[in-house]
Amino acid sequence: MAGSTHTVTNQAPPLTGYDVFTADRALTEAVERHLPTELREEALAELSGTGRSCGALQTQEWGAQANASPPVLRTHDRYGHRIDEVDFHPAWHRLLGKGVSAGLTDTWSRPGGHVRRAAGFLMWTQVEAGNCCPLSMTHAAVPALRADPDLAAEWVPRLTSRVYDRELRPARLKAGVLFGMGMTEKQGGSDVRANTTSARPLAEAGTYALTGHKWFCSAPMSDGFLVLARAPGGLTCFLVPRVLADGTRNVFLIQRLKDKLGNRSNASAEVEFAGTWARRVGEEGRGVATVIEMVAATRLDCVLGSAGLMRQAVAQAVHHCGYREAFGGKLADKPLMRNVLADLAIESEAATVLGMRLAAAHDAAGAGAGDERERALLRLAVPAAKYWVTKRCAPVAVEAAECLGGNGYVEESGLPRLVRESPLNSIWEGAGNVQALDVLRALGREPAALDAYLTEVGAARGADHRLDAAIRDLLTELADLAAAEGRARLLAERLALVLQGALLVRYAPPEVADAFCASRLGGDGGAAFGTLPPTLDLAAVVERARPVV
């Protein structure tokens, strides 16, 4: 029998058994805003189902189990045969199966597919971010494969399938497949043009033998991989199947799995190619151009993933403070804690609104005869958003953990996992400097991208004097791009902040837009969270962020 001193009081109940979608007002409003009327009822019902799955105790337990049991590499079987397989905890497979069945790899062919998938991906990240990597790679491989109609016809139906088949066997025998990718090498990192992996043409047209090493190969248990290698005509994109058509294993030597700070449930590997069979995707020498749309899709997923992590961190903090009592009242009602929670909530909502706007732009841009202005907007807004939103994730996660006090430093709270995960999206798919330089390239080479951006933010002019001033200051910055590399990060930050401000002024409740513009654009706030002007309607901001269980 527990002693009287062990009676548990003044603790928040677990945040479980709720609909993650309908509890997120910023997200539900974005979906309703960006989907045509005829799609909304079906999409909202589907996303609510995903939201209930994300909020279910069983799903949350699977996430914790997968994170606590990292994958294990088996290079050989008991008899000494090379097999290069990765074993995962059963919870990983359950999560991945649910993610596939929820449509997180099924985007490109259905109306409103990007908005619907973006909302699902943002929610699924909150359960366990590790399994989102193969979901993202599989989703993003589709536009790259479309460079070769024959390959697209063969692979895309399986990539967009809602069937998860974990067995390693020929793709033609599977109802659904997953894709990974291997671009970077140890000597080049983000500078993929320094790649040395070679591709020797074989007798069959379009086929090659690859020799080389990949320093980071995402999702090495996948059925296929898009990789870059140097063919006679230059850097080229290739499809490397894990299992060949005759059932034999392709030469795919996994040297080791990376021991990472976070993202523990997901396998990231170093792999060796030694006469590995591959099929060319696109033209020789056009490797970067072939994968560029894949890169854009994965970078948007970094934005969405960070937005999801921020949302979960804020939801946990607001939930905890709504129950926890200290100094004679609820923590959430204390003016200083309310300021912190509101500041966090604003950052989270700004990330969500921006990520969903970019997903809507993908839907509008489409393929072929899509909206050129939306396509141009993506060219500038995606690297700016990827730069800024992913960098805001870590401070949000750390501050949210602090809201729980010592409880937030304990693994069982889930906050330490969010903290470890929070820097990842800023590093993957091109770290901060890569994104900032990409912003400069877009500004210098594609005038339509800046025109589209200015049209987007211009739709909010006149609604808030601080936003108007920020737009004017930005135009002054953009007037002289000579020797701009040294201030590329500042430009990317300001582009993202102004765009977030414009979107919130147009779409968010006045109290949210007011707080954002005052603190992020008007200079009326400090460097740390919890420094908003106290004259703002912070109680309404916190209440909007509260997850209703």
Image (cartoon, rainbow, N blue to C red):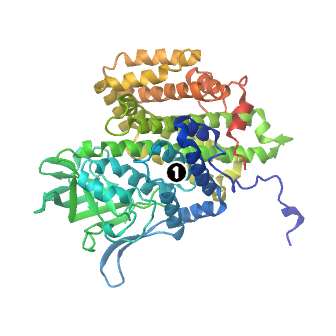
Q: Is residue 452 left or right of residue 316?
A: left
Residue 438 percent coordinates (x, y) = 34, 34
Query: Badge 1: how crowded within 10 Å, few (<14), some, or many (20+)?
Result: many
Query: Given the current orientation, which residue lies at the most extreme front position?
Result: 38
Image quadrant assignment for residue 503: top right
Who's the residue at 78% across and 53% down the image?
Answer: 11
Who's the residue at 76% across and 39% down the image?
Answer: 332
Q: In this figure, which residue is indicated by the disc labeled 1?
A: 421
* Residue 427 vertical placement versus 84 (above, below): above
Q: Is residue 216 at least partly visible in the picture?
A: no
Query: Given the current orientation, which residue lies at the most extreme bottom position?
Result: 79
| Residue nearer the viewer, 438 or 458 | 458
Q: Is residue 42 left or right of residue 141?
A: right
Q: Is residue 379 left or right of residue 204?
A: right
* Residue 382 vertical placement versus 457 (above, below): below
Q: Amino acid at mark 1?
A: Glu
Who's the residue at 74% across and 44% down the image?
Answer: 321
Residue 527 percent coordinates (x, y) = 59, 30
